[in-house]
């Protein structure tokens, strides 16, 4: 007959704990600066995206969904 325990599928790497290696990123490196060149519109936007918001900056409002 059928067992009382529900069968569980094997999860991908469920039993193994993997450590994520956090690589130190240079925010002023050439790749980061090239990205900032295409993404940011001005110096304040660049600093805000890098995690240095300037005081008195207007807060971004999320898009309203209908």
Image (cartoon, rainbow, N blue to C red):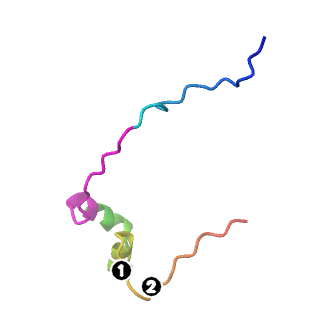
Q: Could you say which is closer to the camera, residue 40 or residue 54? A: 54
Q: Are marks 2 and 1 in contact (CB under 8 Å)?
A: yes
x then y, percent, for residue 18: 38, 38
Disc 1 element? helix
Residue placed under numbered mark 2 in the picture: 57
Disc 2 element? loop
Q: Residue at x 27, y 61 (%)?
A: 32
Q: Which residue is at the far right?
A: 1
N-terminal of the pair, mark 2 or mark 1, is 1
- Location of residue 52 with respect to 10 vertically, above or below: below
Image quadrant in which you'd find residue 2: top right
Label 2 Cα crowd, 10 Å radius (few <14 / some 14-19 / many 20+): few
x then y, percent, for residue 33: 26, 64
Q: Which residue is at the far front?
A: 4
Mark number for residue 44?
1
Label 1 Cα crowd, 10 Å radius (few <14 / some 14-19 / many 20+): some
Gap between marks 2 and 1 measured at Cα? 9 Å
Q: Main secondary structure of the magenta part?
A: loop
32 lies left or right of 14: left
Q: Residue at x 51, y 80 (%)?
A: 59
x then y, percent, for residue 29: 21, 61
């Amino acid at each position: 007959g059928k067992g009382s325990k529900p069968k569980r599928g094997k999860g991908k790497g469920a039993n193994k704990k993997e450590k994520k290696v956090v690589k130190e990123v240079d925010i002023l490196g050439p790749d980061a600066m090239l990205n900032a060149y295409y993404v940011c519109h001005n110096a304040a936007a660049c600093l805000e995206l890098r995690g240095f918001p300037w005081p008195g900056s207007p807060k971004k409002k999320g898009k309203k969904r209908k």
